[in-house]
Image (tube, coloured by chain):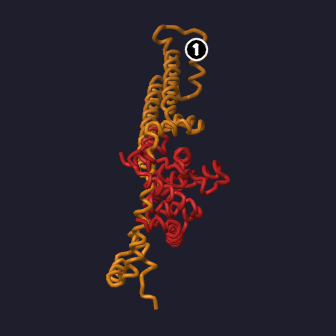
Chain colours: A red, B orange
Amino acid sequence: MDDRDLIAYAQQGDRQAFTELVCRYQDSMVSLTYRMCGDLRLAEDAAQEAFVRVWQNLKSYKPQYAFRSWLYRIATNAALDALRRERPTTELDSLSLADPGATPERSAEDNQQAVQIRRAIARLSEPLRVVLILREYQELTYQEIADALNIPVGTVMSRLNTARVQLRQELLVLLEEV
Amino acid sequence: MNLHVSEWLAAYHDGELPANRQHQVEKHLQGCPSCRAELEALEELSSFLKADFVPPQTPPERFAAQVQLRLPRASLSRTPQGAGQPPRWVLGIPLVLITVWAFLQAALKVATFILTADQVLGIAGGRAALLKNWIATEGFLETSANLLLFNGLLLIGTLILWSAWMALWLAWTRNQTETSIKGGVT
């Protein structure tokens, strides 16, 4: 059964269809909230909250918009809410020094690089960070990002450019080492 | 005049340029080391960002179960008829029709018995006669033939109502199913 059918059944209140949607989109939703929050526990909590909001608002979903964009919009807001709730006075450098994705297979150098990237992204302003994550990690098109954030495509492009310029400056040393 | 294509490079890198513009940028890149370096920097940054992996997540079944537990109670109570299933009150209509039909049938049988009892059984009691007179004064149910006609009409009417209800129900169900598959497009 494809997404459209599952969405249609879930809109009728079919919880099994909704569960299937949750399983299908868990990975990308958690990935997005993780990029936003920088903490897996917080990210999964935000993603679950996002799915609850999806269930509550499923009937208002209009199929002329990409389901993915609609999901990411909700997930982005849930992640931002989670961040505000959990870390109202977040110090950027307090983001976990330890890489939660660290495994014995990954070198310490790789882990350090991942932490630096996460910190650099966290230093971006909220609007720039969201656009960058949706493009670089979630690989949404400009139009999908515009739909997800309810902003013009031109704004997506300018924010993305600014975000990339700022990131390059932040990561200059690391990039030169590559 | 700036002949470089810097303003299009990000969109080019993201595969967002229309074909004609893309061709224009590619042509320019062939002869411009500066723009090529700029494009390489964009590509380098993108691949560098990918070095930050998402750590292993909660298994899907467990994650989905946790989501289910968080769904509000309010939505539990409004749960879900299956796709295309009509509201409960619609299902009550045939029951009401059958009950009305059965009641009228029973009433007519009793009336018929009363009207013909004196002929069939030779009973001409006071109450039967009174009832017979009362029914007869209504003008219509004077004879057994009229009763039979009325009974038949009632049966046909009930069948028509029944068929109409079935047709409406099927049309409604089909409409619901199509709407749900299209995702409620209006």
From the image, which quarter does the N terminus of chain A lie in? top left
Rendered position, A103 above or below A163? above
Is residue B171 visible to the viewer in this orientation of the structure? no
Q: Position of residue B95 (x, y in %)?
A: 50, 28
- Circle 1 — which element? helix
> Residue A159, position in %: x, y?
53, 69
Residue B89, above or below A84: above
Question: Dot 1: within a 10 Å radius of its alpha carbon, few (fewer than 14), some, or many (20 or more) residues?
Answer: some
Looking at the image, which is closer to me, B49 or A158? B49
Q: Residue at x 56, y 18 (%)?
A: B132
Percent coordinates x, y for residue B14 in the rendering = 41, 68
Task: Please state if B20 lies on the left or on the right of A89 as rendered.
Answer: left
Residue type at numbered disc 1:
Ala
Apparent side of residue B131 relative to residue A137 in the rendered image (left or right): right
Q: Quadrant of residue B47?
A: bottom left
Q: Position of residue A120 (x, y in %)?
A: 53, 62
Asked whether A11 or A136 is in front, the reply is A136
Residue at 48%, 43% (x, y): give it: A12
User: Where is mark 1, residue-wise?
Assistant: B129
Residue furthest right in the image: A89
A120 left or right, relative to A85 = left
Residue A42 visible from this viewpoint: yes
Image quadrant for the C terminus of chain A? bottom left
For this orientation, the residue located farthest to the bottom is: B1
Who is closer to the viewer here, B90 or A65? A65
Q: Nearer the viewer, residue B90 or B50?
A: B50
